[in-house]
Image: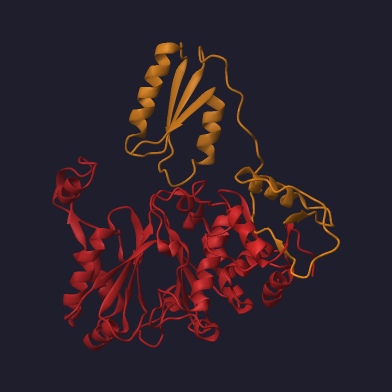
Chain colours: A orange, B red
Amino acid sequence: MRVIKPQNPRPQAFVVTHRLAQSNRKVVQNTKVNAMAQQNELVTLDPRGGSTHEDTGIATRPASLDGLVIGLLSNNKPNSELLLSDVAGLVGEQYAIKEIVEANKGSHRVPAPPEMISDLAERCDVVITATAE
Amino acid sequence: MSSLTSTRVRHTDYNDAQEYYMDEGMGDGLPVVPPTEAKVHAMLDYVGMQPSEVIAEEGVRGVNFTAEKVAINAVMAGCKPEYMPVVVAAVQAVSEEPFNFHANSTSTNGVGVLVIVSGDIAKRIGINSGTVAMGHGFRANATIGRAMGLIKINAYGSVPHGMDKSTFGHPGKYSFCFAENDGVIPWEPLRVEKGYADSDSTVTVFAANSPVQVNTQNESAPEDFLSIVADASIVLGERHSEFVLALSPELMNYVRSAGWSKQRIKDFVLERGTRTGRELNEKHRRITLYKGDDLDRRMPVVSSTDEITVVGVGGDAGPFAMLIGAWGDVISITKKIQT
């Protein structure tokens, strides 16, 4: 099969869509369209969609946690706070942590409230999240 | 009509197209109907939509379900154009925030999208509500349900082993769609219960676990067979936000004869389908979950009768009920089908 370039410029949403679609799957190589279409050839459409969210990538990692404020974000699974507490303890043994900020988003089934994300972003240098049944 | 903007792929023949969609993971493992421009346009023409029209916006992943992508997936599922209004309404329904589509598309719980259609459109387009209503053999049931599965995979990105982390999954993730049987229910249909006119047609979507069939053989008094149903509801376990109780026409006859209302059935099943906090502690890993007065308090499977949906469906013969649990923190959504 061959991928055919759309004749018209793609809308921005389409470009985002395609980038996301490719992220999980093998990229289809673009080749020239065979002008001499055979009788049994057929042209079909890609069913994949994508997100309108901006792809912000991964935040820059600090070289050291010394002197930094560490956030612990629980998803409220039964043992997530226990796990986070242990992780914070291990981190504290290796680095001079300035402060620990604890947050619990209330349920693993819903995103953290935007104000909680904003608060953590404002107060913390690094946030650790965890899930544990 | 404006042009389709999706990437075109040229195939040497029909089989080449099948292999392409399989290899690229753009499907559910079964062969698909190749989504050609002509077939996709036929879908869009039937509902009078432009390809770029946004049918619904899903907030968590920021996915806009365009008419084009929905139509492509509906074609792939094998839908006829006259099924498209049902698919459109179902896409609108799953995109509502209380349906929590992102979470139930990723969870280990492994739910599928159950589509229950209520209203005249079911007969007009051939959605089976009788014998084998939840099984195979009827194109409208099979392909509308399948379209929602493909939309979830392709348009939303819930790819198995990727975003879809179902521990088991279940066969309803391929397709799960049936219609309420107006002919057997002695009370208001689902569409009216949900606030729509009797003359409307609606879809109601659930984040559905696998159905559990309950055999109530030799019991014709509602108290007796609903006790069996209530007992069975306990096996759905905790963490369900809702469940569907589908009663066969034979059971419907019994409740009609006994003069039971839909609400009375819900009250009875909710009250009888309980375990004490002590029993739950003993049967679950979180052994200290219930304490004090809760140890002897009887805990229902769901918190209120508003979270039980009773529908009449199925073949004439058979004293069977079907229980379908819905994943936690999901509220079923009903939408009017625009016809």
Count of marks, rendered view: 0
| Relative image position of residue B257 (x, y in whole percent) | 23, 88
Q: Left of B288 or right of it: where is A120?
A: right
| Residue A40 visible in the snapshot | yes
Comparing B24 with B268, the one in front is B24
Please tell me which residue lies in front, B275 or B7: B7
> Residue B71, image x and y in percent?
65, 67
Direction from residue B291 to residue B306 in the image, left or right: right
Residue drawn at x 70%, y 61% is: A45
Task: Point out residue B234 in the picture as x, y percentages from the top left corner.
Answer: 23, 60
Q: Is residue B103 left or right of residue B12?
A: left
Q: Work out whether B118 lies above or below B307.
A: below
* Quadrant occupied by the N terminus of chain B: bottom right
Q: Nearer the viewer, residue B77 or B321?
A: B77
Query: Is B274 located above or below residue B337 in the figure?
Result: above
- In the rendered image, the vertical position of residue B75 relative to residue B183, given as above or below: above
Locate residue B169, reporting x and y percent.
41, 56
Above or below, A122 against B202 in this view is: above
User: Can the viewer see residue A124?
Assistant: no
Residue at image point 17% right, 76% down: B223
Q: In the rendered view of the protein, which quadrant contains the C terminus of chain B? A: bottom right
